[in-house]
Amino acid sequence: MRWLPESLVRGDGSIRKDWASYAIALLLLDAFAAATALVVAFGLRPAGISGQHYIAAVVAQVPCWLAVLALRGLYARSRLLSGADEYARVVQAAALLAVSLVMADLSVGTDLMARAWLLAFISGATVLSGVQRVAARRVVYAARARGAFRPRAVIVGVDERSLLLARHLSDSGFNMVGFLDDFRPIGSRIGSGVWPVLGAAYDLERAAALGADEVFVNPLATPWESRRAILGGHASRRFDVRVLAGRDESLTGNINVVSRAGVPMYALREVRLTGLEAVVKRGFDVVSATALLVVFGPLAIARITSRCMSRRPVFERHTLLDVRDRAFTVYTLAGSGPRVVSKLPALLAVLRGQMSIVGPAPIESKSGASGALPELRMMKPGLTSAVWANARLFDDASMVAAQLEYVRNYSVWRDIQILWHRLLAFHRSRTDAANPAAFWQFRPYTATAVEQDS
């Protein structure tokens, strides 16, 4: 389009490379700070610690210092250059490390923690890290004059509040690309002709195509339909979504409060599991699937043998949708009997990584995902869920709420609890008839239930 300058098109996400380099630089500076503090505190080391042993302690303490800083979010882009909050987090990390060292010394019972040494090390590392971060900020501010460290921002919804935010972000080092809005034609100019309207409010693909790093949503200037499409969108976007603070958004369970250019925002937490949580979840799935195959395998073999001898169909085929709306095939055992036995062949989908033991209710491909809440599709579908484990306690609306609460507040302990309740339900009704039509589809995904949850 002629009204769209070529300079706005950037798909390589280079701002993230800027921030990745900055985070690595901070990591090296913090390691240097901890090592320097340990060298300075050498003369105050606990009695009986030789120089050789002290070198080993330095090698061990530097990663500990970096770990607590990372735990406090001091290498996350949303926490960097965030005013005094960044320095406060350095102090909090120092206090956390000090308490951890004391508790470790007491638990082991070595009584080697000298107070003077601990004070010198912790205070030295804190001061040096703080000073180095002040210097690093000066470097970033100088680099912004050359175009680096300037996040590309797109604002969704146009009103006076949005214009004020655009001017403030532009003055604070952001590169304001433009607006997405449902009520103004594409290509029209906002703010005395400075910023263009790039597309409809729900069209975040346009923001991605322009290389946006952060998208700011003004809920008061965005229709309900577009707002729901944005907040329930896919978690694999390259940009971050921020919501201007408002009472309605503060009631949701998947937001964090952050500050961008001094303005309080709601940052959407990704529902999709990542990092250590994803590893633990995957390990739990593999171990549980293997155990179920070992325990209930003989019952499945007996049913297969019986149906083969009577020349009846052995398997039922189901085509489900995964987290990316791609179809995959799952088989269950035909016939009546305990549901856990009927689902044993589906454990192969768990071992392949297409499903989880516990998760939101799967969706059949023939019904499509349009009726399902987007957040319930951010985790792998499960062979069982909180709803199946306590089916008698739920009506249509509460089925949606229960699964939504599970996704937003996931932990491996919730999976164990749900499986325990499912085991109790299995003992209460050993002849639970297997109804294949009820395996993968819940009434909560009907339009009425979705509207009630909204």
Image (cartoon, rainbow, N blue to C red):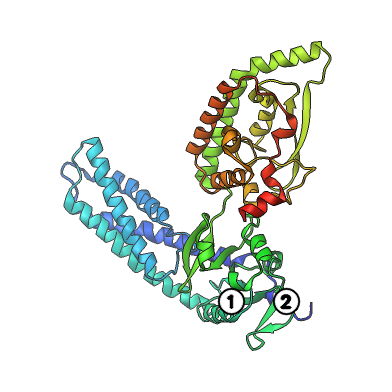
Q: Residues within 10 Å of mark 1 (few under 14, many from 20)?
A: many
Res 6 label: 2
Which quadrant of the figure contains the N terminus? bottom right
Q: Is residue 209 above or below residue 420?
A: below
For residue 439, say whether it is visible. Answer: yes
Q: Crowding at label 2, few (<14), some or many (≥20) Cα neighbours within 10 Å?
A: few
Judge depth for marks 1 and 2 and give the one in front.
Answer: 1
Identify which residue, 40 or 309, lies in the foreground. 309
The three-letter amino acid code for the residue at tag 1 is Asn
In the image, what residue occupies the spot 71% across and 47% down?
446
Q: Identify the disc placed on residue 14.
A: none
- The residue type indicated by label 2 comes to Glu
- Regarding residue 218, the answer to whether it shows in the image is no
Instruction: Count how many numbered circles sit on residues in the image.
Output: 2
Considering only vertical position in the picture, is 238 above or below 329? below
Q: Which residue is rendered at x = 38% and y = 66% of the image?
A: 85
Q: Is residue 90 left or right of residue 355?
A: left
Which residue is depicted at the point 60% across and 77% down?
A: 176
Image spot of residue 336 (x, y percent):
72, 21
Image quarter of the C terminus: bottom right
Residue beneath label 1, please? Answer: 175
Question: Horizontal and vertical percent for residue 293?
Answer: 62, 22
Residue at horizontal 56 percent and vertical 71 percent from the top? 151
